[in-house]
Structure formats: C-alpha cells, structure tokens
Image (tube, rainbow, N blue to C red):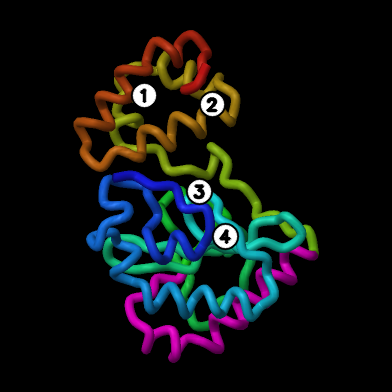
Amino acid sequence: MKIKPLSVDDYLNQGCGRCRLGGTPECKVHTWRKELDQLRQLMLDSGLVEEIKWGVPCYCLEGKNIAVVAALKDFCSLSFFQGAGLNDPQGILEKPGPNSQAARLVKITSCSQIKTLRPALVALISQAIELQGSGFQSPKQTSDTMERPKELLDAFSKEPDFQRAFEALTPGRQRGYLLHFSGAKQAKTRADRIEKHRSRIFNGLGLQD
C-alpha cells in the first residue's frame, strides 16, 4: 500500500510511500536503513533543519533546500541541490542524470563507505551551507549547449524547414523538447517523440503549451 511519511522517522520506519511496497518489508528504504541513519546524523550534526519534502528527508537553511537523503534500488544517496558549485577534490559527486544542471549526489552502498568518506562528506555539507548563504546559483544549461539527439539531427537534414521551425522556438521551449527527446533510451522512441511533436514545433508551441 502507498503511504505518505509525515516525518523522517516515518520515512525510516515505514518507507517513502512512492510505490506499492511502501509500508512493507520490501520497501527499498529498509534495505539501506543503517546507511540512511548515518547520513541523517551527519546532516543533523551540521545544524540544518530537517523536513520531509517529496516524501524524502530534506535538509534546509532558512527555508532554502540544501540537500536530501534518499534510498534507491541499488544505493542510497546524499544529494546537494547546488552540488555543481561545490569543490570536490575526491571526485565523489555525480550527476543524477545526463541533463542534470545544478544537482549532484554521492552514491552510498555501505556504512563502511560512509566512515571512509566522512571527512569529505562533512566538507561538502559545510561548503553547501556556505554556498547557500552566499546566494550562489549554478549556471543553467541553455538549449545552445545541449546535445541534440541523432534522430533530431536526421529529421533536420531531411527537412530544413523543420530545423528552422525548431530554432525559431524560444530557448525554453527548445530545451523542453530536447530534454523530452533525449530522455528516451531507445532510438525508435526518440524518433516517435519527435514525429509526435512535429506539428506543434511548426506551430511555434512548446511541450507544455
């Protein structure tokens, strides 16, 4: 059954409630309970305010989101909202996905790993707090710098008017389409998505218009 955790204790004891396994022993939160407890303590030791947002533990400074702790199937994680601005000499931060901009996460698979990485994790948390206090905002990726999937380039080469229509869209609309097209893992799905939205692009409409 799906549940909605009202506190971090609920999250740790019952699960995140995002799928049918919430509230059952099979919930992925229980797989990483010890590791999540340790990550939680690191965040609390930093003095950040603990809340539940999006069904997971979120740590905030003066109402601003700093980081979240979450359980996934193959690992649990400590994710920083402005991780792209952090100095990471050990190279432990990763992008959550290929199109991620500011967010970065550390993948955790054992308590011994947390023990080994503790100094680095504490340093990252401290940096994240300082960064938020400075008002830093990570630069956003624009449509000009985003990679265009091969299927879209093929469509452009076959129909130059289609390329002109796409490039006439606002940067935000272009970016929305690029994220949507590139989000498909299979080439056929990418091509199908492009064809599905072809008329909208010709009409100057964005993905959500």
Secondary structure beneath dot 3 equals loop
| Disc 1, SS | helix
Principal SS element in the magenta part? Answer: helix
Q: Which of 132 and 144 is in front in this view?
A: 132
Question: Mark 1 and mark 4: span between their CA atoms?
Answer: 43 Å
Q: Is residue 63 left or right of residue 151?
A: right
Q: How many labels does the image show?
A: 4
The amino acid type, in three-letter code, at marker 4 is: Cys
Residue 106 showing in the rendered view: yes
Which residue is label 2 attached to? 173
Q: How far apart are marks 4 and 2 (CA)?
A: 30 Å
Q: Where 192 sits versus 96, above or below?
A: above
The residue pinned by badge 3 equals 54
Queried whether the magenta region covers residue 41, the answer comes back as: no
Query: Where is residue 30, by image quadrant?
Result: bottom left
Name which residue lies at 42% across and 65% down.
Answer: 12
Mark 1 lies on residue: 156
Q: Is mark 2 on a helix, strand or loop?
A: helix
Mark closer to the chain start, 2 or 3? 3
Q: Which of marks 4 and 2 is nearer the N terminus?
A: 4
Instruction: Estimate the x, y position of residue 32 in percent, counting from the top left.
Output: 34, 71
Disc 4 vs disc 3: Cβ atoms closer than 8 Å?
yes
> How far apart are the two marked residues, 1 and 2, measured between alpha carbons?
17 Å
Identify the element where label 4 is drawn.
strand
In three-dimensional space, the C-alpha distance between marks 4 and 3, rounded to whole angstroms, equals 9 Å
Say which amino acid is labelled 3. Answer: Trp
Percent of width and height locating residue 103: 54, 57
Could you tell me residue 136's position as x and y percent?
74, 59
Q: Specify the label residue 58 is tagged with.
A: 4
Q: Nearer the viewer, mark 4 or mark 2?
A: 4
